[in-house]
Image: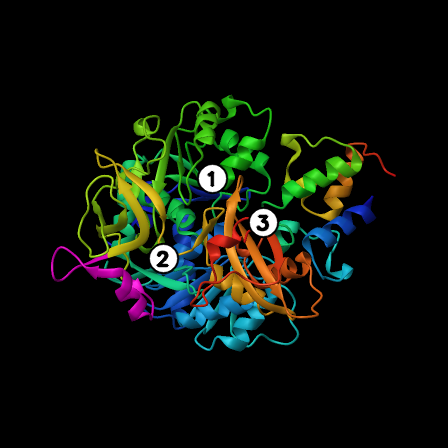
C-alpha cells in the first residue's frame, strides 16, 4: 500500500464526493485524482525519478493538495516549504535535498529567479496562478497548471513505489539554526495517519477545516488523513480574518477543527460569537503548545458539541500523545498517553526507564518514527538509538516529561532552547545569525518570552557596535526581509553587553526580563 | 484618508521600503506585507485613528486586505476624516 492508493480508491468508490474546497473552488475525489495524475505525468516526463524530491512552495490552495498527491503518484517524495520562506533559505533546502522539481505560485518572482540561478538539481518548475513577468526566458523549463497540465493523461502513470519508498521530507528547525529534513516513507505516513484518525474517531462523513499551513506537518496531515478516510477538507490559507473561519464552519458544516493556541486565542478575542454557528463541530484538536486552562473552558462554551483533544508531537515521528477528552477536566495540564500502535516511555540520562514523578526524556517507539534526517548521519544517530531489538531504532524526542501514577504524561520543558511561537519551532540560533548580518550589530541573543496570543514571543537582545545608530525597526525590518514571518522578533532590547558564563556562553535565561542582570 | 493609511502600513510593516513598493491594489496577505497576527494591529489603528468600531463580522479580506479595500471600508463606515 502506498499512500496515494487511498486517493485512487476514493475516486472509484466516491467519485462525486467533495474532496477539497479552497477559495470557492470545489474538487471531487474523481477530479482530484485526475489532476494528480496529470501532474504526475508531467513530472515523470520531465525526468523525475522514483524517490526524487519535489518541492511544493505555496500557500494553502487547491493546487497544493493536487501537488501532494501528484508528486506521490509520480513515485517521488514531496517537500512542503512554507510560502513565506525567503529565497536563500528556500535554495538551501532545495539544494540540501537535491530537489528534482519545484511546484510554486507564479508570483514568487524572487524565489523562482533564485531557484533558476542557484539550484542545479531542479530540472522542472511548475507554476500555478498568475505569473510575474520575467526579463527574458527563465533558465529552467516551465509548465503552468492551468494551461499545460490538461494536455497530460488523466489516467495514472505506471506504479513505481512500495511502502518502504520515500514519501516526504519535512524540514524542521534545530537548535543549530540549519533546518533538518525529517525523512518519512509511505509506511511511516500511513502508520501515523492511521493512529491519529483512530483516536480522533474520524469517519468519512467528517468535514475538516484546515487553516494550518500545509507546510507544517500538523496542517499537512489534515489533507493526508482526510484522503485516507475519504473525508472532505476545507482549506483556508490564513487566520488573519477570523470571521472567515466562522463563515466556513457555519456554511460547510465543519465537524473537525484542528488548531494551535494562537488561533484559539484570536478566535476567543472576538465578541458576539454565536455558539450556534459552531454546533456542527464534534472535535477540536490542539498541539504545538499547551492550551491555557482558561481558554479550554471558554472553547468548551463556544463549541458546545465538541470534544477537545490536547495532543503533543514532534516532527520526527509526526505525533506522540493525545489526551482522551474525557480526561481533560481531571488533568487539564496533561498531554495524555501514547497514540494507538505506538509505545512511549521516559528515560534518565543513562537511558533507563523511570517511574511516575521522575523527570526524564520522552522516547518513542513506533512505525511513525522517521527514517532519519536527510544527509545528516550524526544528527540522526543522536536521536535514533537502539530500541527493544537489535535491528530497531527508537526516537529520543529531546523533550523532558514526567508521568503521574496512572501513566498520564506531562510536558516539562525542551532539553535545548528551541522557542515555540504560534505553535511553530523557532531556532534562536537561526534568528541570531540573521540579526548579526546587520551592519552595526556586534552580538545578538534571542530568547522566548511569554505572550498571551503567541505562546512565546521572540525577543532579541542586541549589542550595538560602538558608534552604531540602530533602532528596533531596523532589526525587525531586516529580519522580516530575511526570515519567515513566524521567525521575526516581536521585541528588541539593546544592551551594552550580553550576560555570559565563565566559559563565555551567553546566559539566555538572564535575558528574559527587561534589562534583567 | 488614503495618505494616513499608506503611511501606517509603510511605517508598521514595510520598514525601509520605498513608498512605490506599496501598491494600493496589492493584497496584503498574498504579497506577505501583513501576516495573520498583523491584521489585528490594522484594526486597532482604524478604530483609534478614524474613530470607528470594526465589528467581528467585518473582519474580512474584502474590507481589510489592501489599501483600496481599507479606503472603501472606511468610507462605508462614515469614518471621521480630518
Image-based side of A103 in relation to A225, left or right:
right
Q: Position of residue A51 (x, y in %)?
A: 32, 67
Identify the disc placed on residue A261.
1
- Position of A225 with respect to A303 (left or right) is left
Asked if one can make out residue B76 in the rendered structure from this viewpoint, the answer is yes
Between the residue at mark 2 and the residue at mark 1, the CA separation in whole angstroms equals 42 Å
**Which of pointers 2 and 1 lies earlier in the amino acid sequence?**
2
Q: Residue at x 41, y 45 (%)?
A: A288
Query: Which one is nearer the viewer's eye here, A106 or B36?
Result: B36
Please indicate, yes or no, whether residue A3 appears anywhere in the rendered image: no
Which residue occupies 51% across, 44% down?
Answer: A450
Of A52 and A399, nearer the camera is A399
Look at the image and say whether residue A374 sits in the magenta stretch: yes
Say which quadrant the C terminus of chain A sits in.
bottom right
Which of the chains bears the disc numbered 1? A
Residue linked to disc 3: A514
Q: Mark 2 points at which residue?
A: A155
User: Numbered disc 2: what chain?
Assistant: A
Residue A104 on image: x %, y %: 52, 61
Amino acid at each position: 500500500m502506498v499512500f496515494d492508493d487511498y486517493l485512487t480508491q476514493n475516486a472509484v468508490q466516491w467519485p462525486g464526493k467533495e474532496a477539497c474546497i479552497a477559495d470557492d473552488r470545489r474538487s471531487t475525489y474523481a477530479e482530484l485524482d485526475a489532476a494528480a495524475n496529470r501532474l504526475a505525468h508531467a513530472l515523470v516526463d520531465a525526468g523525475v525519478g522514483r524517490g526524487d524530491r519535489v518541492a511544493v512552495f505555496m500557500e494553502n490552495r487547491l493546487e497544493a493538495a493536487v501537488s501532494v498527491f501528484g508528486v506521490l503518484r509520480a513515485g517521488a517524495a514531496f517537500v512542503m516549504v512554507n510560502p513565506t520562506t525567503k529565497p536563500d533559505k528556500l535554495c538551501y533546502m532545495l539544494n540540501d535535498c537535491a530537489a528534482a522539481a519545484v511546484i510554486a505560485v507564479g508570483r514568487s518572482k524572487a524565489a523562482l529567479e533564485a531557484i533558476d540561478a542557484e539550484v542545479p538539481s531542479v530540472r522542472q518548475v511548475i507554476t500555478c496562478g498568475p505569473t510575474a513577468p520575467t526579463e527574458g526566458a527563465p533558465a529552467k523549463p516551465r509548465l503552468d497548471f492551468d494551461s499545460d497540465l490538461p494536455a497530460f493523461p488523466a489516467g495514472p502513470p505506471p506504479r513505481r513505489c512500495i511502502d518502504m519508498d520515500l514519501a516526504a521530507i519535512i524540514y524542521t528547525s534545530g537548535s543549530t539554526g540549519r533546518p533538518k529534513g525529517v525523512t518519512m516513507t509511505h509506511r511511516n505516513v500511513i502508520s501515523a495517519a492511521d493512529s491519529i484518525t483512530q483516536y480522533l474517531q474520524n469517519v468519512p462523513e467528517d468535514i475538516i477545516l484546515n487553516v494550518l499551513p500545509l507546510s507544517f506537518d500538523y496542517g499537512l496531515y489534515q489533507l493526508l488523513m482526510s484522503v485516507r478516510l475519504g473525508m472532505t477538507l476545507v482549506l483556508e490559507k490564513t487566520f488573519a480574518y477570523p470571521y472567515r473561519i466562522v463563515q466556513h464552519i457555519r456554511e460547510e458544516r465543519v465537524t473537525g477543527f484542528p488548531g494551535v493556541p494562537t488561533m484559539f486565542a484570536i478566535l476567543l478575542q472576538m465578541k458576539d460569537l454565536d455558539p450556534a454557528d459552531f454546533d456542527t463541530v464534534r472535535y477540536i484538536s490542539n498541539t504545538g503548545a499547551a492550551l491555557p486552562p482558561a481558554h479550554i473552558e471558554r472553547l468548551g462554551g463556544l463549541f458546545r458539541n465538541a470534544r477537545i483533544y490536547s495532543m503533543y508531537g514532534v516532527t520526527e515521528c509526526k505525533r506522540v500523545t493525545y489526551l482522551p477528552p474525557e480526561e481533560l477536566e481531571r488533568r487539564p495540564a496533561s498531554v495524555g498517553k501514547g497514540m494507538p500502535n505506538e509505545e512511549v516511555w521516559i528515560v534518565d540520562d543513562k537511558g533507563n526507564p523511570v517511574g511516575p514523578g521522575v523527570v526524564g526524556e520522552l522516547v518513542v517507539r513506533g512505525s511513525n518514527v522517521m527514517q532519519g534526517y536527510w544527509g545528516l548521519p550524526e544528527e540522526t544517530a543522536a536521536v535514533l538509538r537502539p530500541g527493544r531489538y537489535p535491528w530497531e531504532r527508537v526516537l529520543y524526542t529531546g523533550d523532558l516529561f514526567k508521568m503521574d501514577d496512572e501513566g498520564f504524561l506531562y510536558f516539562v520543558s525542551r532539553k535545548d532552547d528551541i522557542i515555540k511561537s504560534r505553535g511553530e519551532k523557532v531556532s534562536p540560533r537561526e534568528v541570531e545569525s540573521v540579526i548579526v548580518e546587520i551592519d552595526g550589530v556586534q552580538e545578538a541573543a534571542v530568547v522566548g518570552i511569554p505572550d498571551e496570543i503567541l505562546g512565546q514571543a521572540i525577543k532579541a537582545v542586541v549589542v550595538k557596535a560602538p558608534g552604531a545608530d540602530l533602532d528596533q525597526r531596523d532589526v525587525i525590518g531586516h529580519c522580516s526581509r530575511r526570515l519567515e514571518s513566524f521567525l521575526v522578533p516581536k521585541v528588541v532590547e539593546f544592551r551594552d553587553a550580553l550576560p555570559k558564563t565563565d566559559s563565555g556562553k551567553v546566559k539566555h535565561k538572564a535575558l528574559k526580563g527587561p534589562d534583567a542582570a | 484618508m488614503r495618505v494616513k493609511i499608506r503611511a501606517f502600513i509603510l511605517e508598521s510593516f514595510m520598514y525601509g521600503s520605498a513608498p512605490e513598493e506599496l501598491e494600493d491594489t496589492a493584497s496584503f496577505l498574498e504579497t506577505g506585507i501583513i501576516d495573520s497576527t498583523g491584521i489585528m494591529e490594522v484594526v486597532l489603528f482604524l478604530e483609534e485613528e478614524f474613530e470607528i468600531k470594526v465589528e467581528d463580522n467585518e473582519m474580512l479580506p474584502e474590507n481589510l486586505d489592501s489599501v483600496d479595500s481599507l479606503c472603501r471600508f472606511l468610507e462605508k463606515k462614515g469614518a471621521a476624516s480630518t
